[in-house]
Amino acid sequence: MRYLLAVLLLFLLTPLLFTGFPGSKLANHKPAALPEWSWASWWAGDYQREVARVLNEQFGWRNNLVRLNNQKEYSLFNNATARDVVIGKDGYLYEDTYLDTATGRNYQGRKHFQEMGERLALVRDSLAERGIDLLVVMAAGKGTYFPEYHPAAWAGPSPAATNEDGLLQALQEQQIEHLNFNAWFREMKDTTQYPLFPKVGIHWTKYGQFLVMDSLVNYLEQRHGIDLPEMVLDSIEVSSEQRGSEADIFRGLNVFQAPAGYPLAYPYWHVEHPEKEQLKTLVIGDSFYWSLYLHEQFSKKFLGNGEFWYYFNRVMWNGTDDGPASELRLPNDLLGYDLVILFETESHYHRLSNGFLEAAVAGFLAGEVATAALDIPEERLEEMMQQIRETEKWYAYVKNKAKKGDRTEEEVLRNEAQFYLEERIRKKKLRRAVKNENR
């Protein structure tokens, strides 16, 4: 009996002997890193907690044991252990937010979209005064595209209203220029030559993505009367291999088996006449534009290498992360663009632009107040511009902004000085108003 207990104990302790070798990396998981030691973190207990996290993620075979548990849940109980992932009929995978949107469960109501439409109209008109166009792109979503595979918990009659209905009504009432790829994909579903959505991924297929890019180029050419560089299709490869984003949420399940689905089409294309004129375009959107931006380099090839404000959270430029969106200065950072595109999929229709609209409205309104109420002497403006030139980090920011926006340093420098001085005056007025209010 003692020998049996000893063998059992050795078996249980074996993973500890291999600490530091947890197995191949898990998808969508960032392992904890060893913290920096300090007396403050030690006495607060933070250091110990972080080290415990690292040890918990680094014992022997840990990642494969996670996969074993996930495989058991997936194969035996048809349960997805990944966050937000839901298994539908015939093994079709969804994220719950897409199902909630498709079935109207998270419909935000008429008033919500009326207010959104008013903000869109104000931003559209304010941009137009500065020679900038606004376009809303409604990216397609898997929830409305595959209603026949919804899991039982989301099955039922067609909803009375959805966020897509609400957004469309707001866009039409305010006459906001828009492209509804969500409706277009549904219209093509029974006639398209190749699948537009995969079985085990949440984003559109590479073929669907290609159709969107081609359509967007053609639309911009017609609306703006411009001859953009040309997308030329070379060939299409059909493969049962589920590549990249076609199996993104399946890989997030972290199971042992490989993703499986129906054959998908993979277009190969190139750009002709890249020297042609492009529209300097800012895109503010979600992960459906991420692949177009990062992998297809759509902004660089067709949109004048404009910035991509990812979820209005990170600023992407030239394929790299250029800093947090919290450092943006609106409306100044919109100047120099020909076009602003709000690019969102159906699960985000109710929060279109992820806060950009609210920030832009505040910026434009504040700018109008400042223009009407503030009169900054040219001499003071010149002094501020010189101060910026003498501040190395600040002047580097100005030069970088000029480079990205195809504007002169002098123009950006003047806008920066104007913005800074107006902001100081506004803050003083606000403090004075608050002080008077509290008397």
Image (cartoon, rainbow, N blue to C red):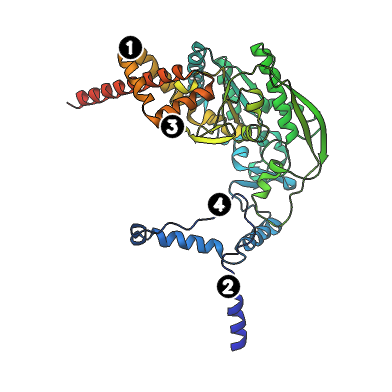
Counting from the top left corner in percent of width and height, residue 352 is at 54, 28
Residue 35's quadrant in the figure? Answer: bottom left
Q: Earlier in the sequence, mark 1 or mark 2?
A: 2
Front-lying residue, 136 or 392? 392
- 425 versus 154 height, above or below: above
Nearer the camera: disc 1 or disc 2 = 1
- Residue 51 versus residue 311 in the image, above or below: below
Reading the chain from its start, which is encountered first: label 2 or label 3? 2
Judge left or right: residue 394 versus residue 98. left
- Which structural element holds mark 4? loop
Residue 30: image tag: 4
**401 or 383, which is in the foreground?**
383
Q: Amino acid at mark 4?
A: Lys
* Residue 186 visible in the displayed image: no
Q: Nearer the viewer, mark 1 or mark 3?
A: 1
Q: Are marks 3 and 4 in contact (CB under 8 Å)?
A: no
Q: Residue at x 71, y 37 (%)?
A: 146
Question: Where in the figure is residue 306, as x and y percent of width and height?
Answer: 57, 25
Counting residues from the start of the chain, the first of labels 1 and 3 encountered is 3
Residue type at tag 1: Glu
The quarter of the picture where the C terminus appears is top left
Residue that numbered label 1 is attached to: 378
